[in-house]
């Protein structure tokens, strides 16, 4: 088995002072999901008053278990972001909105393009309209995705890379983020956009590959099953959840990020075959099969991808600090302890 | 008054042989509008069997008068492109779809963003889904707009220019065109996209500025009223309707255009003050006022804009052949004869 050198990331985490978020009233759409729930837990631990909104659509990331033994101060409001009237009420009385709710499955966006459009575009417009009307000073962070870039024309992919989505989800996420930027430039809403690369960690969806292929790998290896690697040579970069949350907190803390779009990413890049081997190594056992890409998946595959995140590093000093091997170890450890609630 | 040199455009029009479109079954969404009706007339005169779809929304470009004394062979079907069920029926049995229906007013897209989204995005997706299911071999031309580029970062603006819409209409039109390109790459639909610059000519909407500011200028000057020029220094390029129709016919005739996006544009560029003077000269009388930009309009103004259309010229030899002074003269002549039906 290949040996994995520990990647040379900075070792001191770039932590935001908790007091900035103490007593802040924070709203998180998709707050029972992977990123939203981890963010809610962190903010509640820092003294924020957190409201999470989630509709618990079974195929998406929301899971009540994600707030199991969470710190006090989290209010759960079950609602769908497509519900325009509820959103008009819910955006009021908050200082910050982390707007994370979204349909994330690329395959589902092709099978049911209208639902992806409703959630990732129409609902975003109604959230922004609600903020404009009822809470125009709220700080907003929108979670977008590298998927908007499509097949890279050059690597690493920076924010100036052309937008060429290869699936409905990419078209829709770009429209959603552009509405956020537009409502800043025209109406002065305090929005900013983060384009996330592959994010992983505790509380991710592992039932299937709807959130990330890494989820189903973890489920299968922990269940003692062989997992499937499609292709294997494609390079990717990964961010551990804590690094992504740090980025979200930092952009809100810095007014100069308003109206800006930032890539997240990692200098640690790995192909899927090596990632599979690393996972086996972290788990201590397991096996996988390398498979040819299925036909329907080929059409929306993007080849190698990794982000250039130097813009946010220059602006805020943010960079990922959790090496992939460590992040995977923490993730595997979490799912070993909570397997039944996630599989 | 300034003198206007006749611009050195090629003088021989680039005409497509009529026989290519003889007996073709053609569907035109927005077919009672400015571009759609002129296209329908031209195709019917070439022997095509044309069906136009239009919902005659009063604020949009559709006008039954646009088919007054039209050649035989045009079937008018009143329907809205948002009507998913009707579209599923209507796309069948046609060889070509010119997909021109759209909300075009930038100000209306800000006042009522959901309607713009429904027409320019959601309806486009349902038209493509209908084609995919019921008529996957239909040739499709989608009319997009220079508005997607926003404020130019360089001039002239080519197809590689970043997409930075400054209004909801621009966000939506980009999503609409990206769906067309995506349905080509994933499902093999025979789509292509034209990004139109300012188009003018007979049958344009002149009641107000919803389609183009030039419309209301023409209405007011022909009514003996002073017209208003906002700013005056902004450079623009203009395409006469016949040139735009030529481009649409040519891209359909050439399979190599499938999956491509092309700017239309003109090497003849003029600022709005000079355009106003040219219009006065063409009409033979009239006056205008130069006004400061209104505040709400400033936020979505884009400064100078003109297109680089060398991509379609290289691919197909298309270029505009009607000089602005001639096109304006033909336009003014048309509206003099039909003023009551358009004002």
Image (spheres, coloured by chain):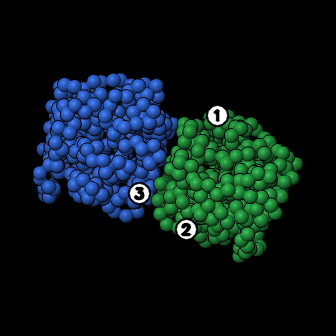
Chain colours: A green, B blue
SS category of the residue bearing label 2: loop
Q: Give left or right: position of B312 versus B179.
A: left
Q: What chain does badge 3 belong to? A: B
Q: Classify mark 1: residues with Cα within 10 Å, few (<14), some (14-19) or many (20+).
A: few
> Which-is-in-front pick, marks 2 and 3?
2
Q: Give left or right: position of B172 versus B315.
A: right
Rendering quarter of residue B82? top left
Q: What chain does badge 2 belong to? A: A
SS category of the residue bearing label 3: loop
Q: Which residue is mark 2?
A: A156
Residue B323, can we see it?
Answer: yes
- Residue A276 rendering spot, x and y as whole percentages: 70, 61
- Residues indicated by labels 2 and 3 sit on the same polypeptide chain: no
Quarter of the image with the N terminus of chain B in it: bottom left
Q: Residue at x 80, y 50 (%)?
A: A223
Q: Which residue is mark 1?
A: A83
Quarter of the image with the C terminus of chain B in it: top left
Residue B342, can we see it?
Answer: no
* Labels 1 & 3 near each other (Cβ < 8 A): no
- Residue B233 rendering spot, x and y as whole percentages: 30, 57
Label 1, label 3: how far apart the Cα atoms are: 34 Å
- Residue B295 rendering spot, x and y as whole percentages: 44, 49
């Amino acid at each position: 088995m290949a040996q994995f050198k520990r990647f040379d990331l900075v070792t001191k985490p770039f932590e935001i002072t908790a007091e900035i978020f103490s007593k802040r009233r924070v709203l998180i759409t998709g707050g029972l999901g992977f990123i939203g729930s981890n963010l809610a837990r962190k903010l509640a631990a820092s003294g924020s008053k957190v409201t999470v909104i989630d509709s618990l659509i079974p195929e998406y990331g929301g899971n009540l278990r994600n707030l199991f033994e969470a710190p006090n101060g989290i209010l759960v409001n079950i609602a769908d972001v497509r519900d325009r009237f509820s959103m008009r009420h819910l955006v009021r009385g908050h200082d910050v909105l982390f707007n994370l709710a979204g349909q994330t499955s690329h395959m589902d966006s092709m099978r049911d393009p209208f639902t992806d459009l409703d959630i990732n575009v129409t609902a975003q417009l109604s959230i922004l309209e609600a903020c404009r009307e009822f809470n125009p000073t709220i700080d907003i962070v929108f979670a977008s995705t590298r998927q908007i870039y499509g097949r890279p024309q050059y690597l690493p992919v920076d924010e100036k890379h052309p937008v060429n989505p290869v699936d409905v989800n990419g078209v829709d996420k770009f429209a959603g983020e552009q509405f956020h930027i537009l409502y800043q430039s025209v109406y002065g809403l305090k929005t900013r956009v983060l384009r996330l690369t592959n994010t992983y960690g505790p509380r991710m969806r592992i039932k299937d590959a709807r959130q990330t292929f890494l989820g189903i790998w973890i489920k299968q290896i922990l269940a003692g099953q062989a997992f499937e690697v499609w292709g294997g040579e494609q390079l990717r970069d990964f961010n551990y959840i804590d690094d992504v949350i740090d980025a979200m907190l930092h952009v809100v803390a810095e007014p100069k990020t308003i109206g800006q779009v930032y890539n997240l990413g990692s200098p640690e890049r790995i192909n899927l075959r090596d990632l599979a081997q690393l996972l086996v190594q972290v788990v201590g056992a397991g096996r996988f099969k390398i498979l040819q890409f299925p036909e329907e998946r080929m059409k929306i595959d993007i080849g190698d991808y990794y982000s250039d995140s130097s813009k946010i590093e220059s602006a805020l000093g943010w960079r990922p600090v959790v090496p992939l091997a460590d992040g995977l170890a923490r993730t595997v450890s979490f799912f070993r302890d909570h397997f039944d609630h996630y599989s």
